[in-house]
Every structure is written in C-alpha cells, then in structure tokens.
Amino acid sequence: MAKEINALELRKRFGEIMEEVRYHKEPYVVTRNGRPMIMLVDIEAYDAVEAQRKEDAFVETYSEERVKEFLKEDTIAPRTRRQVKRSLA
C-alpha cells in the first residue's frame, strides 16, 4: 500500500523520501490540499508498468486489426470469393 505525503512535507524531506522509494520500494502518493496529485515509484516499478502498458496496447491493436480482417472476410459471399480467386489465378 502506498504511503501518503503532502507536497510541503515532501519538499522538506525529499532526500529521505527518495531513498525510501528507491531502496525500500515504498511508493508514495503526493497530495495537495488533501487531493492525490502524483505518485512516486521506483524506476523498476515504473518500467514494469510501462512494459505492461505497451504490451496491452499492442494486443489491443492487434486484436482490433484481426477483428476487422475477420469481418471483412465474412462479408464476401463464398461464391464471390471463388470468382475473385479464379480471376486472379
């Protein structure tokens, strides 16, 4: 679970907080006026999230492309498909 710190306190204790995030793997939510504004995480955690995000985007794009291909293939009548194949051969 992420710890919470307000922006003013973070400014006062930045070096200490940075060490907790980096070496103790303690994420922090930084708040301003009681509202969450940013998240501090160590670089390995960020890299893992970013890699997963890229993989998810690739899968989503690939899936959308495949669905379009399947729909396109399904809209051509079998007879028409055979005629096109014969004319191209």
Image (cartoon, rainbow, N blue to C red):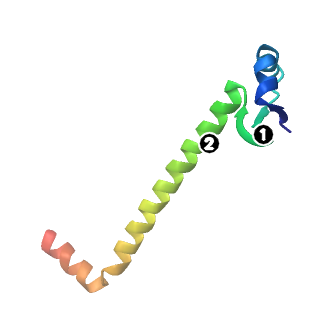
Please tell me in which quadrant of the rendered image residue 3 appears: top right
Q: Quadrant of the N terminus?
A: top right
Q: Is residue 28 left or right of residue 66?
A: right
Q: Nearer the viewer, residue 44 or 74?
A: 44
Q: Quadrant of the C terminus?
A: bottom left
Please tell me in which quadrant of the rendered image residue 74 appears: bottom left
Alpha-carbon span between mark 2 and mark 1: 32 Å
- Identity of the amino acid at label 1? Asn
Q: How far from the left and from the top, in percent, is residue 72?
A: 35, 73
Q: In this picture, is 6 found above or below 76?
A: above
Q: In this picture, is 59 found above or below 68?
A: above
Q: Callout 2: few (<14), some (14-19), or many (20+) C-alpha neighbours within 10 Å?
A: few
Q: Nearer the viewer, residue 54 or 79?
A: 54
**Quick one: which residue is furthest to the front in this view?**
33
Q: Residue at x 52, y 56 (%)?
A: 60
Q: How far from the left and from the top, in percent, is residue 19?
A: 79, 16
The answer to whether residue 54 is visible is: yes
Q: Is residue 39 left or right of residue 78?
A: right
**Residue at which label 1 appears:** 33
- Identity of the amino acid at label 2? Gln
The answer to whether residue 21 is visible is: no
Q: Residue at x 65, y 38 (%)?
A: 49
Q: Nearer the viewer, residue 64 or 10?
A: 10
**Residue at which label 2 appears:** 52
Q: Residue at x 57, y 49 (%)?
A: 56
Q: Is residue 2 left or right of residue 76?
A: right
- How many numbered marks are there? 2
